[in-house]
Amino acid sequence: AQKVTQAQTEISVVEKEDVTLDCVYETRDTTYYLFWYKQPPSGELVFLIRRNSFDEQNEISGRYSWNFQKSTSSFNFTITASQVVDSAVYFCALSEGSGANSKLTFGKGITLSVRP
Amino acid sequence: DSGVTQTPKHLITATGQRVTLRCSPRSGDLSVYWYQQSLDQGLQFLIQYYNGEERAKGNILERFSAQQFPDLHSELNLSSLELGDSALYFCASSFGQGAFKTEAFFGQGTRLTVV
């Protein structure tokens, strides 16, 4: 069965600090997809990134970067120079490659607070 | 704006009642997924429909049911409501059958409060 672990529950940083959110996953499939979503206080789930299991290249999008390491089954998310608007709950999710199992399995989420 | 529309945004109802939550997927998306977010269970997959047919089922209670209509909008019906059903219910849509094929975009959710 697939599983996503976000061991950090709450992180508090001061604006402009860098912060890394950890995500560890478990799956038996060789083909799978990893996601990060942001849930701001308003409640909606905002898609941030999707990465497939065959692409281990790190990705950077502005202040956001993702480090995917299959050897450690981790897909960590770093926010550089954090801002107050980054305050939200961040979820890591996994979808296995089997067509019969298309659901997203979410971690418990990490509450990030960025203080001015 | 994700393009996925959920109505209503908030719903307050009494125990034992029945409610219907509605979801309109993004234009062109054929799959609709329903998720429940509660404080104790986190985000849990309930059910998926693809082009009108049920494709995958999660830990959905027998008191809950869903369907997807020919115009691809979906409804989640919750009956004999209990206090523990209070949660944020999300709908997501994607083009393909599997969330892994494309990004899954979520609606803003319906917050259900059972009193």
Image (cartoon, helix red, strand yellow):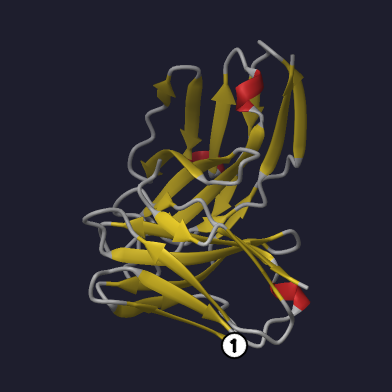
Asked if B102 appears above or below A112 in the picture, the reply is below
Residue A43 position, x and y percent, is 60, 46
Q: Residue A70's x, y, as percent?
A: 47, 41
Q: Splitting the image into 4 quarters, where does residue A82 fall? A: top right
Image point (70%, 87%), residue name: B16
Of the pair B47 and B7, the residue shown nearer to us: B7
> Which chain is mark 1 on?
B
Query: Relative to B59, does residue B63 appear above or below in the rendering?
Result: below
Q: Quadrant of the N terminus of chain B?
A: top left
Inspect the image, locate mark 1, and give the three-letter code of the amino acid beneath it.
Arg
Residue A115 vertical position relative to residue A95 in the rendered view, above or below: above
Q: Is residue A84 above or below residue A45?
A: above
Look at mark 1 in the image and give the residue it sits on. B63
Mark 1 neighbour class, 10 Å CA radius: few under 14, some 14 to 19, many 20 or more: few
Looking at the picture, tell me which residue is in the foreground, B84 or A20: B84
| Left or right: residue A8 compared with residue A67 | right
- Residue at 67% in and 52% down: A108
| Disc 1, SS | loop
Relative depth, front residue between A74 and B56: B56
